[in-house]
Amino acid sequence: MSNISVMRRTILATGLTGLVTALLPFRSALAAYPEQTIKWIVAYAAGGGTDTLARILAETMSPKLGKAIVIENRPGGATNIGATAAAKADPDGHTLFTADNGTLVFNPALFRKLPYDPARDFRPIGLMARFPLVVAVKKDSASTSVRDLVDRARAQPGAINYASPGVGSPHHLTMERLSREIGVRFNHVPYRGAAPALNDLVGGHVESMVVDYPSGLGFLREGNIRPLAVCSAARLGSLPEVPTVQEALGLQGFEAFAWQGLVVPKATPDAIVDRLSAELAAALRHEPVLERLRAVGLEPLTGGPADMERLIEAERAVWVPLIRSLGITLD
């Protein structure tokens, strides 16, 4: 064998050995994951549906991952406070973030400038749940159907009020979309959160509201508010007598809900993303978890990173043009 051939083999062998040596700490880090307590950021206050969802899933995922998962509530700024904290976290799998359609779809259209970029800063882990939306009225409303509510709004443009948890919320945007597609105008009364909006609906101070089912579950069960239509593609099993908007108003393809998924910082390694995605999927197959979610009005929503990406794109195609055409802004 020539000296040149020997030299080439030596260089090749040394190079491969160096590469393997360089990768060993990285592989060890992945094998050891997680190495510490995992922080799960929730951009809403403790006690609400988003917080409850995260805590139910974290409780099931934590033993499988071998480390505690601690929920950190960072409410405010239309989820921007929590989203920014998550975007700036180390991409090592020890910071998770509940991202909803507000964070990933609405906010880029509602704000001229955001402290985070959904595509640049986050990597999907998987879908978790959706919050069904229900068109409801105060219990003594003159409207006994959503068709009747629409007819009244058509006869008195802008005279019928509807409450929402705030400008740019799924509740607000869904009612605006419904109004536009059916060709009527309601008067929007924004509140600072679902609780005060629901309280005024129960108290009869506002006529109507798009209610997310987990928040309104107790009031609906007790008859303090009256459901007229659900915004899902199919009727809810817990409200079988209530028609869908599609059925009641003939709006084919109309579907709206609030949904949430799990994300991590963008540069999080593939192996960690795969591990978290698998554990999230396993938790959402666990029957006790499913029972707990349904008990609080949540619909489990399964799907891995690719499914979440597809949902984000589909939602952007519907909501971004609507937001921009209506000139809705949070700046």
Image (spheres, rainbow, N blue to C red):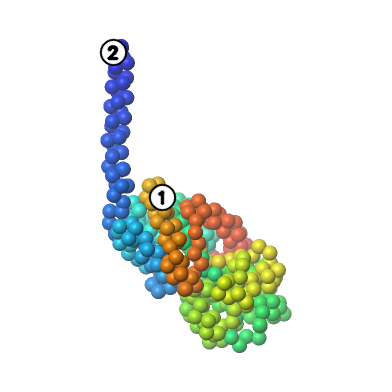
Q: Position of residue 192 (x, y in %)?
A: 47, 75
User: Can residue 226 be spotted in the picture?
Assistant: yes
Please rate how many residues cluster around mark 2, counting C-alpha atoms within 10 Å: few if below 14, some from 14 to 19, many from 20: few
Which residue is drawn at the image coordinates 52% and 53% (left, top)?
A: 307
Q: Against 166, is 62 above or below?
A: above
Label 2, secondary structure: give it.
Answer: helix
Q: Which residue is mark 2?
A: 3
Q: Against 138, is 254 above or below?
A: above
The mark nearer the N terminus, 2 or 1, is 2
Q: Is residue 96 left or right of residue 185?
A: left
Which residue is drawn at the image coordinates 47% and 73% (left, top)?
A: 295
Q: Position of residue 284 (x, y in %)?
A: 45, 61
Q: How much space separates mark 2 and mark 1, taking CA atoms?
A: 46 Å
The answer to which quarter of the image holds residue 277 is: bottom left
Count of labels shown?
2
Which label number is shown at residue 236? none
Q: For the view shown, which residue lies furthest in the front direction?
A: 287
Please rate how many residues cluster around mark 1, counting C-alpha atoms within 10 Å: few if below 14, some from 14 to 19, many from 20: some
Q: Nearer the viewer, mark 2 or mark 1?
A: 1
- Identify the amino acid type marked 1: Asp
User: Can residue 153 be spotted in the picture?
Assistant: no
- Identify the amino acid type marked 2: Asn
Q: Which image quarter holds the N terminus?
A: top left
Which residue is drawn at the image coordinates 62% and 76% (left, top)?
A: 242
Q: Position of residue 128 (x, y in %)?
A: 47, 62
Q: Which residue is mark 1?
A: 274
Foreground pick, 145 / 158: 145
Q: Is residue 99 left or right of residue 179?
A: left
Q: Position of residue 211 (x, y in %)?
A: 54, 75
Which residue is drawn at the image coordinates 46% and 56% (left, top)?
A: 126
Label 1, secondary structure: give it.
Answer: helix
Foreground pick, 120 / 297: 297
